[in-house]
Image (tube, rainbow, N blue to C red):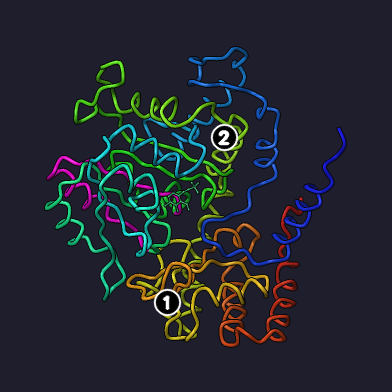
Amino acid sequence: MKRDKLIFELLDEEQQRQEEGLELIASENFVSRQVMEAAGSVATNKYAEGLPGKRYYGGCQIVDEIETIAIERAKQLFNAEWVNVQPHSGAQANAAVMLACLQPGDKILGFDLSHGGHLTHGSGVNFSGKLYVPFFYGVKKETGYVDYEQLEAVALKEKPKMIICGASAYSRDWDYARIRAVADKIGALVLADISHPAGLIARGLLTDPLPHCHIVTTTTHKTLRGPRGGLIMMGKDFENPWGLKTPKGETKMMSNLLDMAVFPGTQGGPLEHIIAAKAVAFGEALSEQYMKYITQVKKNGAAIAKAFLDRGYEIVSGGTDNHLVLIDLRNKNVTGKAAENALVKADITINKNMVPFDDKSPFITSGIRIGTAAVTTRGMKEKQMETIVELIDEVINDPENEHSLEKVRKKVHKLTEKFPLYKE
Ligand code: PLP
């Protein structure tokens, strides 16, 4: 077959973009070569509907072994009793959990999207807000921390069937025990979506939700540094609390209901090449090398927060416990959109983000979100976090000055050259 020059040239350009630029999108990371190799492997050719040992297709003996290793490594990494490694993405993992636990029209309580929550936690433009009836809690205006009193008040008033915690743009740890105590008062299930801080949680750098929350979902590609994908876990399997029945009328354990909600509930054949890559990434995340990495991610989070504060920036909640900061740019007289556009011109990739109680639309926003997972993979440390903030500050202070943006861009390239990607 003739090589597809067009696509491979574009992929080369994308690699160059990743190598030259500063990647500060909090949900992104750079996987290892072996994770990429597994993701691009022959396992992409295999259909394997079902679970290891219980497939609807022949020839699954080898992918069965791969998927079993992925499951066992994920269990070890998160200290989980049960895991499903098949969700194609974080959104798919959440869809499967909701399909397993809820009926259309049931009430759910999630973290407000505009305060840092995720679309799949009840937003009106997402299945979760269309199929179920969403209610929200947010952060306290004075502190920027989750308003647990509000969460409890809404929960007791509305009695949702599920309370969802976890976020896309929240820099603080969660009080899962407190949320569980509220849920127990009304017989609700707690779903923790740890997509962002999963790597920090896995290695004990943040509170572990598994002892408190009934079900935990995550993506595998953020701080966990695996291929793009999702994961569902339980610290302890349990009988489904509402006597929900399968389509055949059976009452089952939650693990069975969740497995069935992934396949055939919301997905077809699992992506065994991606599951192989997940297995490799989970193996890496169990290593000492990863422990050093993820510890540095957190240190870099603290360093970048301090550097921004020192330069007069406002950080929502005043700092960070994890790998990200959410910056409110309203005292800098620039919108999130304008900052994002100017930074991209200087090869600094971040994303605009709503801040709590934002007065601008999601297309404009008052804030930007910045994460340390990807630059830490390149080997950057606290000193480079200060340099990064200096460069961002130069752009934000003069976002329309093309000459100055070009100067910053050159400095970015000089910095990234010293921390090459995929050098081995
Ligand atoms: N949940 C949270 C908290 C997220 O931040 C994200 C992605 O950013 C998702 C779910 C969705 O993950 P995916 O993009 O893999 O569907």
Instruction: Tell whether label 2 touches label 1 (CB within 8 Å).
Output: no
Q: Which amino acid does label 1 sit on?
A: Asp
Above or below residue 117? Residue 193 is above
Q: Name the residue under label 1.
A: 328
Q: Where is residue 202 in the image (x, y as percent from the top left)?
A: 44, 46
Q: How far apart are marks 1 and 2 (CA)?
A: 38 Å
Above or below residue 403? Residue 349 is above
Tell me what residue is drawn at x 29 percent, y 52 percent.
110
Which is more toward the observer, 197 or 188? 188
Q: What residue type is labelled 2?
A: Ala
The image quadrant where one finds the N terminus is top right
Tell me what residue is drawn at x 17 percent, y 48 percent.
181
Q: Name the residue under label 2.
A: 279
Local packing at callout 2 (Cα closer than 10 Å; few below 14, some 14-19, many 20+) is many
**Which stretch appears magenta?**
172-196
Task: Report the side of 378 relative to 385 (left or right).
Answer: right
